[in-house]
């Protein structure tokens, strides 16, 4: 597998991001604030992997601090990103790039996202005819 050696900087704290390969899903994680950048396909892929919240090793309090930051640019294509609340989990605000559709989660947010997802999944299964 070819891994691009491009340098990607955190859209929030500007520290360099490191590439992490989690069960063949490649993600970028900030070396400082531990925010996570996911490309459009990586989001659902990573969410589906068992135990993937492991990659979200950052401090929740740090994440909360950076969560309030607005007017951030996409780390990949530098397009100004828009803040969005998760459709099902309003407490999660993440940034999404309108151009390349990547998403940025502050530390702790992916864990939150992931945990609720499992619950939602179970709920959906019960509701299913
Ligand atoms: Zn950062
Ligand atoms: Zn972008």
Image (spheres, rainbow, N blue to C red):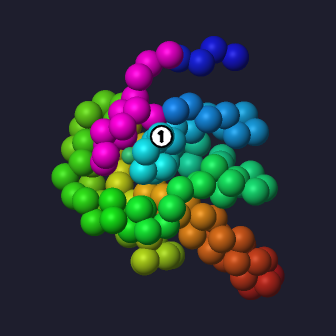
Q: Residue furthest left?
A: 71
Vertical placement of residue 120 versus 46, above or below: below
The residue sitting at 53% across, 56% down in the picture is 58
The residue sitting at 33% across, 60% down in the picture is 66
Neighbour tally class for label 1: few under 14, some 14-19, many 20 plus, Cα within 10 Å:
some
The residue sitting at 55% across, 60% down in the picture is 110
Vertical placement of residue 32 versus 52, above or below: above
Residue 31 in picture, x, y percent from top left: 47, 40
> Is 15 situated left or right of 87 in this image?
left
The residue stretch that appears in magenta? 5-17
> Is 53 situated left or right of 59 in this image?
right
Residue 14 counted in the magenta span:
yes
The residue sitting at 39% across, 68% down in the picture is 64
Vertical placement of residue 40 versus 128, above or below: above
Question: Which is nearer the eye, 34 or 122?
Answer: 34
Quadrant including the N terminus: top right
Residue 120 in picture, x, y percent from top left: 67, 76
Q: Which residue is mark 1?
A: 31
Q: Is residue 73 visible?
A: yes
Q: Is residue 128 visible?
A: no
Residue 42 counted in the magenta span:
no
Quadrant including the C terminus: bottom right
Kindly tell me whether mark 1's CB lies below 8 Å from ligand 1: yes
Element marked by disc 1? loop
Main SS type for the magenta part?
loop
Residue 77 in picture, x, y percent from top left: 31, 30
Residue 67 in picture, x, y percent from top left: 34, 63
Identify the image quadrant of residue 41.
top right
């Amino acid at each position: 597998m070819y891994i691009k050696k491009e340098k990607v900087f955190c859209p929030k704290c500007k520290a360099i991001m490191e590439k992490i390969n989690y069960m063949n899903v490649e993600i970028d994680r900030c070396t400082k604030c531990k925010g996570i950048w996911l490309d459009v396909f990586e989001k659902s892929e990573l969410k589906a992997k068992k135990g993937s919240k492991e990659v979200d090793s950052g401090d929740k309090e740090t994440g909360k601090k950076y969560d309030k930051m607005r007017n951030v640019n996409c780390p990949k294509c530098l397009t100004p990103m828009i803040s969005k609340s998760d459709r099902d989990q309003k407490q999660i605000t993440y940034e999404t790039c309108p151009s390349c559709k990547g998403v940025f989660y502050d530390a702790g947010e992916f864990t939150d996202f992931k945990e609720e997802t499992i619950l939602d999944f179970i709920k959906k299964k019960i509701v299913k005819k």
